[in-house]
Image (spheres, coloured by chain):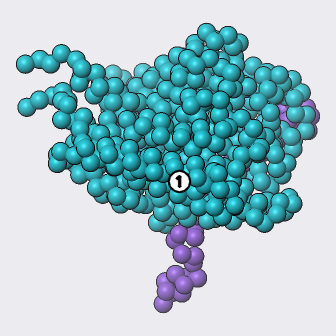
Chain colours: A purple, B cyan
Amino acid sequence: MTRELASKRSLPPLVAGVLAEIGYASAIGAIGILTCAAALFMSGVL
Amino acid sequence: MRSSPRWRDLGIVLHYTGKILAGYSFLCLIPALTSLLAGEYAPAADFFLSFGAILTVGASLAAFCRNGSRPGWMHGMATAGISWLVAMVVSALPYWLSGHYLSYLDAMFDVMSGLTTTGLTLIQDLDHVSIGLNMWRHLLTFVGGQGIIVLALALFVEGGGGGYGFYVGEGKDERLFPSVMHTAKAIWKISFIYLMVGTAALWLAGMTIGLSPSRAFLHGLWIYMADWSTGGFAPMSQNVLYYHSALYEAITFIFFVVGSFNFALHAAVLKGNRKELIKNIETVSFGATLCILTMLACWGLMKLQVYPDLVSLIRKGFYQLASAHTTTGFMTIYPRQFAAEWGDLALLAVIMAMLIGGSACSTAGGFKGLRVGILAKAIIQDTKRLLRPSSAVVVQKYHYHGLRTLGERQVRGAALVVLMYMVIFAFAAAAGCLAGFPFLEAVFEAASVTGNVGLSIGVTTASIPTGLKLVYIFNMWAGRLEFMAVLASAGFVASLFGKRKL
């Protein structure tokens, strides 16, 4: 019963998969932004 | 038993090349219908004429070279290599008829650039190209990203025993399903799912920056096609810089990163195995090299005070580097800014990113994160061997769709591909220097063509010598097919004319 409810609440695998990949790419972008910020910080600009 | 190909084998190769070409010709109908809808009747006539010509050539080859034999591994590999060259020659016809190219060679250069998802262009007056021709340019790069052989396998070529040879010959070696035809269909299914999501996102982004709904849709569709395929073509000569939109840049960033992932990874994630995203050796390798190279590029850019604030460092510096690393080639700066502003250190980071590239069995080029990861693991393994007693057995594991043990075969395969990339990269760099370009500019452009990237430092123009255009065409072709089909095609042709041992 709990499993049935959980499966009803979760997204279809295809949608969840697309969102996971977009989320992962966004996380890569966030890491890149942080790396740029760190470079600016180390050079004394930030 | 015989080991070298005979003329009968050439018939098999040409028969399947003809079949692939005949199917491929139907792609011309998409820009033809687009042109008709847009009221562009002259471009529509060009595409209908090209459709008839390509279909005739393909159907003739398929009919006259029919000999009833099933293709084997060798035929598959040679067909893959030769099909790409024949596709380049025939696909240039609509380009040449458009009047936007100074020669047929320039048109073929652009076709090879599109099909290999490189993105360099020799087109004249890009900003005034017809809607139909823009559709053809971006369609070529979208189809090339998935692979023309993958398209043929998905639609109509049964392939037989050589089906896997066709597939591997195109630089893809991951089977998402036991059947190669099912694998090809799955690759197209994944691409169409993202085509809808990406086009919708860019359509909305286009309207927020003031484009009309129809123009925003077409630009969204074209940019998305080049984005997902890590192609780098754009409908305007200023590339992504034309839109002056952080939102547009963010969306293109997300989809070129996703587009550079392995199709096997997409299939695993879309089936529910989302942990593969963070465990896979390719994504780990990509994240690590992107961080290291971003640091290096930022250091170089900061030293010269090129982008003194965080926003411009991200939108100009990081965007260019990520575009290079995924081998997309989208630009938010002018080509000559690389040469005039970026400095040696930042350019070195971009060159390294272009050579490494994205994932294996993806739309991306370069020698791939998988091979960087395998070679890094091999270095760790050898270091451990040095530090432990000689009798100790050092087992090195890596995660690639499950935990695998690193063996000599994988290391040798990875090292050979990297070595061959470096050889043709050096060849193109030498050709650039011979044509009179400064060393750094010749090296940058060589890395861009070899890695199928498309970023330009300003070397690639219609005025470069014919020899350099031919070298760049060869590098784009060899880099995209990852050498196996190129070597097989060359060996196949050479052995047809060579002396036969009795």
State the image quarter where residue B326 is shown. Answer: top right
Q: Position of residue B234 (x, y in %)?
A: 70, 45
Residue shown at 27% from the left, 51% from the top: B159
Taking the image as shown, residue B15 lies to the left or right of residue A33, namely left
**Amino acid type assigned to the residue bearing label 1 in the image:** Phe
Q: Position of residue B108 (x, y in %)?
A: 54, 34
Q: Position of residue B380 (x, y in %)?
A: 47, 30
The residue that disc 1 covers is B48
Q: Position of residue B179 (x, y in %)?
A: 30, 57
Q: Where is B359 relative to B26, above or below?
A: above
State the image quarter where residue B318 is shown. Answer: top right
Bin the neighbour count of mark 1 within 10 Å (Cα to Cα): few under 14, some 14-19, many 20 and up: some
Taking the image as shown, residue B20 lies to the left or right of residue B468, namely left
Q: What kind of element bears circle 1?
A: helix
> Mark 1 belongs to which subunit?
B
Q: In the rendered image, which quarter contains the C terminus of chain A?
A: top right
